[in-house]
Image (cartoon, grey):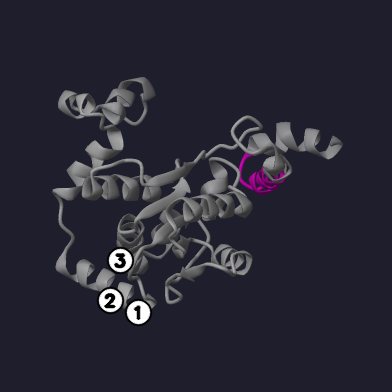
Amino acid sequence: FWADREFRTPYYSYVPEEFSKAGYGRLYFDGQLLSRLQWLEEFEGYVESVKRRIGYIGQIISVHIRRGDKYTEAPYIPMEIFIDALRQVCRRTGINKVFATSDSTDAIQELVAKLPGMDIIYDDHEPRYDNANHELLMNNPDLATQETMTAVKILELLASADWIVGPENAHLTTLAVARNSARTGTESNCQLIPGVLTFTNVHPKHIPLVIKERLRQYKRMRHKKWWYRRLVSPVMRRL
């Protein structure tokens, strides 16, 4: 299944005929499947306790800023693009409260600093490792319960918002949109940002930022991949 992309693609894109006729897509169908599952009582209790502690009440926009090992798939999405998306949703909805989550503490702090006019809440008790989570757990299996609770909390707080902003290639974002669509009956309460930014899918003012993040990705990858050292690095040194 995992080794054959052509074989597995139909499973990811499948939507029952009655859903597609009603105008619903894959995320809504995924949300319906997920809504049939129930968290363990200890997980539900933990999520509710976090909501009370951080003031997760009223109308909220949630935003997922993916960092960590995401650069192995694509360059990071510049913070300015998240900020533009949040401002657009704020103008459209009138909602000024934002729940922010990220695997990087620096990203949360940057967002707060650059959006002083918004009421931004986040879980300041959450450990953030800014790395590859699966590698972290392989090396530290004692953190499995903690990180599972954290993932459940992030998913539920993203999904419980009125609007969701995040990368279209981040699993927690798409799972949250799926759960949200099953709850609200619409797939439109989200603003998904292209996971791979190009000159054609960003505002011209952001092109320098996209180039900058691409260069940063190359720099990070040179320590990870042999092909960077052999093929890309010589070219980059000439630029």
**Front: mark 2 or 3:** 2
- Please tell me whether the stretch drawn in magenta is mainly helix, strand or loop: helix
For disc 2, the marked residue is 49
Q: The residue under label 3 is which amino acid type? A: Met
Which disc, if any, is residue 149? 3
Relative to 78, is 33 on the left or the right? Answer: left
Disc nearer the start of the sequence (3/1): 1
Magenta-colored span: 212-225
Disc number for residue 53: 1
Q: Position of residue 129 (x, y in %)?
A: 50, 65
Q: CA distance from mark 3 to mark 1?
A: 16 Å
Q: Earlier in the sequence, mark 2 or mark 3?
A: 2
Residue type marked 2: Ser
Marks 2/3: CA distance? 12 Å
Neighbourhood count class around disc 3 (C-alpha, 10 Å): few under 14, some 14–19, many 20 upward: some
Q: Give the quarter of the image for residue 42.
A: bottom left
Marks 1,2: beta carbons within 8 A = yes
Q: Is residue 51 visible?
A: yes
Q: Residue, x 40% and y 52% (percent of image)?
A: 164
User: Mark 1 falls on what kind of element?
Assistant: helix
For the residue pair 207 and 9, the one nearer the viewer reads as: 207
Task: Report the front residue among 232 and 157.
Answer: 157
